[in-house]
């Protein structure tokens, strides 16, 4: 067997091994990237989780220091939402916020389409 024949038989094996190494490198890079992003994801999502849990807890469950704070020990309740909508002006606040945001966005959009000095700065 000549050297050329042996080399031609080894080339597919070498190419396959190089492809496997490249694939492992890509997988490793993705794993390390997402592992590095995981702490930031936890920091970003934890406040939303905490608000959702505490919104449905009873008052006694919220202030009891003897229980694990990340889950329910008494049944979930809608008591806080009922108080929010029945005893506060929350619906008015939401309406006012939406109206101001809508009018502000409309004003900016109108100013963008006019040829006035300084309208490009918006």
Image: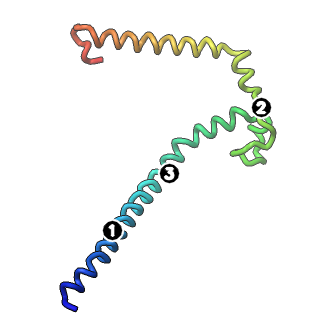
Mark 2 or mark 1, earlier in chain? 1
30 vs 1, nearest the viewer = 1
Q: x, y (%) of residue 29?
A: 38, 60
Q: Position of residue 69 (x, y in %)?
A: 71, 45
SS under mark 3: helix
Q: Mark 3: few, some, or many residues within 10 Å (few <14, many ≥20)?
A: few
Q: Could you tell me which residue is drawn at 37 percent across and 69 percent down?
A: 20
Residue 39: numbered disc: 3
Q: How many marks?
A: 3
Name the foreground residue: 102 vs 7: 7
What residue sits 50% from the left and 46% below the top?
Answer: 41
Q: Quadrant of residue 10?
A: bottom left
Q: Is residue 24 above or below residue 107?
A: below
Instruction: State how far apart marks 1 and 3 are (Cα).
Output: 32 Å
Contact? badges 3 and 2 (CB < 8 Å): no
Q: Where is residue 11 drawn, in percent x and y?
A: 26, 77
Name the residue that disc number 2 marks. 77
Which secondary structure lies at badge 2? loop
Task: Give 41 or 30, whichever is nearer the viewer.
Answer: 30
Mark 1 and mark 3 in contact? Answer it, CB < 8 Å. Answer: no
Image disc number at residue 19: 1
Bin the neighbour count of mark 2 within 10 Å (Cα to Cα): few under 14, some 14-19, many 20 and up.
few
Give how far apart the Cα atoms at labels 3 and 2 are.
31 Å
What residue lies at 41% left-to-right and 55% top-to-bottom?
A: 33
């Amino acid at each position: 067997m000549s050297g050329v024949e042996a080399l031609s038989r080894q080339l597919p094996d070498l190419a396959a091994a190089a492809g496997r190494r490249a694939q492992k490198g890509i997988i490793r890079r993705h794993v390390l990237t997402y592992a590095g992003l995981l702490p930031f994801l936890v920091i970003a999502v934890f406040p939303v989780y905490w608000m959702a849990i505490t919104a449905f807890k009873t008052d006694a469950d919220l202030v009891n220091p003897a229980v694990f704070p990340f889950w329910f020990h008494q049944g979930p309740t809608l008591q806080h939402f009922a108080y929010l909508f029945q005893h506060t002006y929350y619906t008015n606040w939401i309406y006012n916020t939406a109206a101001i945001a809508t009018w502000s966005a409309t004003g900016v959009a109108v100013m963008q389409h006019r040829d006035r000095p300084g309208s490009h700065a918006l």
